[in-house]
Image (spheres, rainbow, N blue to C red):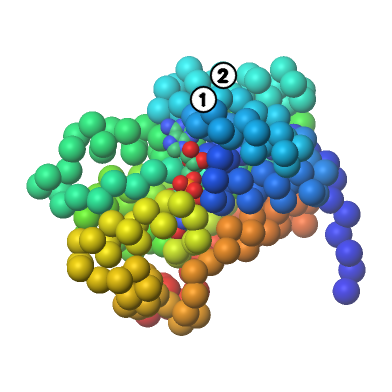
Amino acid sequence: MTTTTVIPRVALVTGTSSGIGEAVVKHFCELGHQVLAVDFNPDGKAIAEAAGAAFYEADLTDPDACRGAVADAVKRFGGVDILVNNAGIQHVAAIEEFPEAKWRQIIDLMLTAPFLLTQAAWPHMRQKGWGRIVNIASIHAQVASPGKAAYISAKHGMIGLTKTAALEGGEQGITANAICPAYVKTPLVDNQIADQAKLHGMGEQEVIENIMLKNAAVKRLIEPIEVAQLVAYLTSDAAGAVTGASWNIDLGWTAH
Ligand code: NAD
């Protein structure tokens, strides 16, 4: 087996106060990257700094905040080599009752912000002739479930953005890939377990086994670090030929 040397890069990661984003920041810092962690939760500052990353507080539903985050990375570190679009929220309601404001918030955060961040980071990647974009999508970028119209629409859209960025970036040394996880053990899923338990009158363990893992071949939740390690591969030099793809890390969920 050959060992791969990781070249230190400048990485901007969104949604870093918990879950997958927090794990990505920690793993990137361990690999020696300079990391700007971006989140609207001020608690993210202590979390980022403990990992060795810088922090930029921003509500990414605001377009100026997206551009501000990239500008901050450029000011601190001289550019952006790696962009990980990870920030996300969930809202569960049938289409008939889905609040328009929630629809807009989810699309702004999970589709428009990744586009604006990609757009702002692009010239810096192009200048260097090297860039890596990883969009944290979901199995819900490939299949739908009732009650999650905005989330599923945003995630499906993210695959389109990923493929387009891959085609435009090919000649410029920029790759773009999406990661599609099934249920990862994070606060986003913990809240859903509690909500679904209430909704279905079930125990929380029953929700995990009978709803979340029903379609899974591997019967456990995914750990955030497992997603972070895939992000690390896709943002490495070794992955230069890998672009425009959706990478499932889904316990066999979509093999049905
Ligand atoms: P999480 O709730 O632990 O983390 C989401 C992060 O996004 C938090 O740090 C939160 O503060 C931040 N955030 C929310 N709104 C923001 C805003 N307006 N501006 C800036 N930051 C904001 O969730 P997670 O499970 O780690 O999810 C991360 C990503 O992974 C999301 O895009 C989610 O859709 C995706 N995903 C998660 C799972 C899962 O099972 N957990 C599965 C598939 C995909």
- Mark with earlier residue (2, 1): 1
State if disc 1 and disc 2 touch (CB < 8 Å).
Answer: yes
| Position of residue 37 measured from the top left corner of the image (x, y, whole percent) | 63, 34
- Can you identify the residue that label 2 sits on? 68
Badge 1: residue crowd in 10 Å (few <14, some 14–19, many ≥20): many
Which residue is more in the foreground, 239 or 135? 135
**In the image, what residue occupies the spot 53% across and 66% down?**
222
Q: Element under label 1?
A: loop
Left or right for 172, reference 90: right
Left or right for 100, reference 27: left
The three-letter amino acid code for the residue at tag 2 is Gly
Which residue is more in the foreground, 100 or 197? 197
Which residue is more in the foreground, 28 or 126? 28
Badge 2: residue crowd in 10 Å (few <14, some 14–19, many ≥20): some
- Can you identify the residue that label 1 sits on? 58
Q: Is residue 174 visible?
A: no
Q: Element under label 2?
A: helix
